[in-house]
Image (cartoon, rainbow, N blue to C red):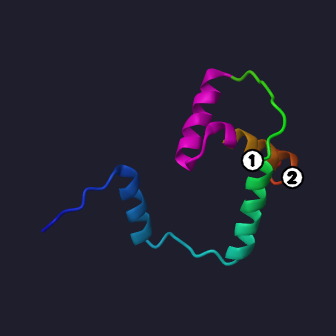
Amino acid sequence: MNTLKLQPDELELLVSYENEEWQSLKNVKEQAAQYQAYARATLRKDRRVNIRISAKDLLDLQKRALREGIPYQTLISSVLHKYVSGVFTER
């Protein structure tokens, strides 16, 4: 018998799937259009901004971006865009 060796993140996905934790999206076309709009707005970069943040915050951003599979600068830009467009709000 050939045993498949999975990475920890792959194993986590498999367990999640087998536990029926996954759900189908109801409005796939609408969701795709929404994320395409986010991508267009995020990718259209015509200004440079330099900011100073703590080393810990930067490391956390880089880890989060790695989990999302995107560059950390793109994550920062996306979060800022969502905040100013009202998608993210203060608690």
- Is residue 70 found left or right of 34 in the rendered image? left
- Kind of residue at disc 1: Leu
Q: Quadrant of residue 33?
A: bottom right
| Among numbered discs 1 and 2, the one appearing first in the sequence | 1
Query: In this rendering, is residue 52 above or below 29?
Result: above
Instruction: Between residue 29 and residue 7, name the one nearer to us.
Output: 29
Q: Position of residue 17 (x, y in %)?
A: 43, 69
Q: Position of residue 84 (x, y in %)?
A: 87, 46
Q: Which numbered dot is residue 5?
A: none
Residue at image location 24% in from the left, 61% down from the top: 4
Give the magenta-colored segment's residue range: 54-74
Q: Quadrant of the N terminus?
A: bottom left
Residue on which the image places disc 1: 43
Residue at image location 67% in from the left, 37% down from the top: 73
Q: Which numbered dot is residue 86?
A: 2
| Nearer to us: label 1 or label 2 | 1
Residue at image location 50% in from the left, 69% down from the top: 21
- Kind of residue at disc 2: Gly
Q: CA distance from mark 1 to mark 2?
A: 18 Å
Which secondary structure is most common in the magenta stretch? Answer: helix
Q: Is residue 88 visible?
A: no
